[in-house]
Image (cartoon, rainbow, N blue to C red):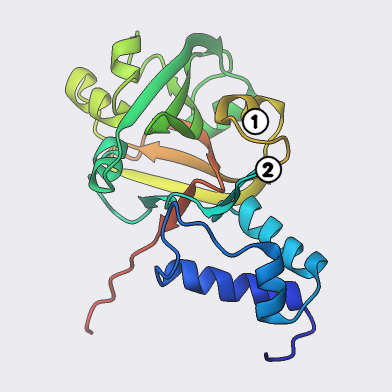
Amino acid sequence: MKKNPSLHAYIKDELLNQIKANKYKPGDKIPTELELCKDFNVSRTTVRTALNQLTLEGYLVRHQGRGTFVADQKLKQTLTQTVKRYSDQVAIQGKEAKIFVLSITVIPANEYLSQQLEVAHNDPIQCIERIRKANDEPTQYEIAYIPWIVAPGITETQAASSLYASLKNDFQVHVAKTIEHIEITLADEICSKHLDCELHAPCFYIETLAENENQEKVEYSRAYFRGDKTNFVIERNYPNS
């Protein structure tokens, strides 16, 4: 075996490559810790560290008394220009999408929301909390802020589908552009509850600011994605000139 200053990282990469190459498919049981120790000629501690990292990142699932298994493939979501809704992207991957509305409240715009949405301080803002699920597993917890003047009285039915589609179809508000900022964060108490994950588990965090064709701000949102259940695809097109 190739010598590496971080043996557990090497083993992790080797196992991950085998998973991505479909040598081990979702639901397959991987070799035991003892078998992996023999295969890689390393200690059990080294193997366990590699397996723990793959489990934390959502590639493996460990069942007490049964062994370690390859997890279901992560839900892929596209960040490029697309008209596909969340439900469409999930359906393509053979999963059923559901959106659960936790709450819809009207709050006064604080200083930060006033700045982001370009509204007056204390203007009414609709705060919409939602959870998105794929095959009944939570993948995303989102808080969206929409000025009342943009779409007054958004209903639970409208929020339980595509918000952008509801804005267009029911309020004649077309989202022409979004600006998204992506970071890595750790799940706090609220996120871990809504995403059904461990406290301080790694999550993707995306802030989105949406504009209409007149460059007016129509929505600001904060979304948290389970890092072990989601990955993102970014596609870029380069003109031949």
Mark 2 near mark 1, Cβ–Cβ under 8 Å? yes
In the rendered image, which quarter contains the C terminus?
Answer: bottom left
Instruction: Identify the residue at image location x=50%, y=30%.
Output: 142
Q: Is residue 167 above or below residue 95?
A: above
| Coordinates of residue 25 in the picture (x, y in percent) | 41, 60
The residue closer to the viewer here, 115 or 17, is 17
171 horizontally vs 208: left or right: left
Identify residue for label 1: 192
- Residue at left 33%, top 56%? 80
What is the distance, in whole Å, between disc 2 and disc 1 at their CAs? 8 Å
Q: Earlier in the sequence, mark 2 or mark 1?
A: 1
Residue 16: x, y in percent?
54, 68
Q: Which mark is residue 101?
A: none
Q: Secondary structure at mark 2?
A: loop
Compare residues 15 and 199 and report the one nearer the observer: 15
Q: Is residue 45 above or below residue 119?
A: below
| Residue type of the residue flagged with mark 2 | Ala
Is residue 112 visible in the rendered image? The answer is yes
- Around disc 1, counting alpha carbons within 10 Å, would you say few (fewer than 14), some (14 to 19), or many (20 or more)? some
Is residue 210 shown left or right of residue 62?
left
